[in-house]
Amino acid sequence: MNIFQDTGKYMLLMKRVLIFPDRWRMFFRQLPKELEKLGLQSLPIVVIISLFIGAIMTIQTKLNTENPMLPTYSTGLVTRDTLLLEFSSTILCLILAGKIGSNIASEIGTMRITEQIDALEIMGVNSANYLILPKIVAFVFMMPFLVIFSMGIGLVGGYLVGMFSDIITTADYLLGIQYAFIPYYVFYSLVKSLVFAFLIASVAAYYGYYAYGGALDVGKASTNAVVNSSILILFFNLLITNVMLN
Amino acid sequence: MITVTNVDKTFGDNHVLKNVSAVFEAGKTNMIIGASGSGKTVLMKSIIGLHRIDKGRIEYDGRNLPDMKMSDIRRLRREVGMLFQGSALFDSLNVLENVIYPLEMFSRSTKEEMKERAITCLRRVNLPENSYYLAPSEISGGMQKRVAIARAIALQPKYLFCDEPNSGLDPKTSLIIDQLISEITQEFNITTIINSHDMNSVMEIGEHIIFINKGEKAWEGNKNDIFHVDNEELNNFVFASNLYKMVKKANQ
């Protein structure tokens, strides 16, 4: 029963959020702050995780596919396609659901329990639109850049393995990451990331907006935001993959 | 003027407000008093429109709130200022920006005019100039209340609501905040409603007092009458503190 109630409440909240702002000037003042906070400040974690995962994936693929029948470029090819198809969109978004989701839920949740949202409502401001819309727009806008960045850095991680170890040669790796490249995979990955970005920002905002009680409850709202947005990411991943790659 | 007529409010089986009626006049400090859980906060939130009432009328100078559409309620709220128990200042903005915020949202003034108006409001509440660019967390509780009052009056509201304005303040600062609210009410002819259980506030600025007990209006009067009322619940509330017991004895 709760799932239907939550879905209904989420839809009603989105109806209030996804309209034109009362004051564009205020919206455009908020937007750069959110772009910086949700997008640029996520770059370090994206770089670190993508670099290491790209390197580890290259090592694992090479070590687990020791077969003379397989062409030498296969390690690079598998690394590239794994990064393009799943890691840089889905897994990265699951990681960002933790960072961004908890950030949004706790920020809005704290505003709720300290009556700042009530203060906005009393002033006659559409608080949902004012607080949530810039976050959704900023995160959805930044996500494709983060995904493309993650793809590039992940591939660099694999290349560094070739440079600094004997596991694979850089020539084989470079051949692999260029072999049978399908640009549609990048498009598919970007479409997924846009949907996931919307889910992360909106679900986290929903849990924050309806937080009540004290500091402990803001923590609970934050946890719920991360858990539920992660589940939704996995569900929509299945759905989009089925539609776009089947 | 705000007129409340036969207001009823229930939460599930809990009948919180029972047929409450009252008239809150402009230029007067109207106080809603009562013990914790008596229904005074629900009454105030119902008057503001944060709770939808089950029955009755809440008229803002003839405009009945329960009949209004959301867009009309938003428009009406631009005539309302509110001082929250915890001040509810925006953490991400400094003191001056907090006061400018409602002006940016709803006025068509230039940046300079807005800043000038905000500074006028901050001066009116006697906030030292060196605190204008500090974050709300960097100033004291009393100063936060002053900033909240300045923000509430920035758009020159016709109606001012104060929820426990003295909560968390020392007696001297409480007195200053009470006097400030009273002065602003008279100066701008605002309809002010204060929700409080602080007897010192009641005795300081209670020009029109409504006592709520178990969801019903149990008494109505002013600060001069409150010590001479034959109402057991009100007497229990008023004379709960030793200070007022002594006042009662001295009067006898």
Image: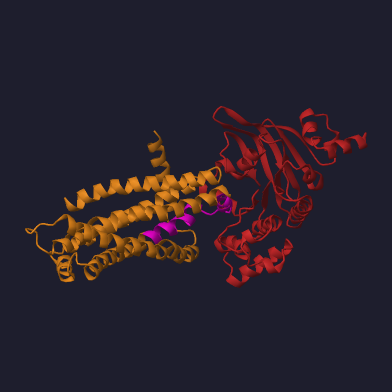
- Residue A120 on the magenta segment: yes
Q: Nearer the viewer, residue B167 or A21?
A: B167
Colour in which chain A is drawn: orange
Q: Which residues are magenta?
A: A115-139
Quarter where residue A67 is shown: bottom left
Q: Which residue does the image show at 41% across and 56% down from the upper left?
A: A100
Chain letter matching colour red? B
Magenta segment's dominant SS is helix
Is residue B29 one of those drawn in magenta?
no
Q: Is residue A176 above or below residue A3?
A: below
Q: Position of residue A215 (x, y in %)?
A: 55, 46
Residue B155: give x, y in percent of width and height: 63, 59
Residue B139 location (% of width, % of height): 67, 60
Residue A12: image x %, image y %? 42, 45
Residue B43 or residue B249, whichever sits in front: B249
Indicate the quadrant containing the C terminus of chain B: top left, top right, bottom left or bottom right: top right
Q: Is residue A12 visible?
A: no
Position of B249 with respect to A163 (left or right) is right
**Is residue A209 in sight in this rendering?**
yes
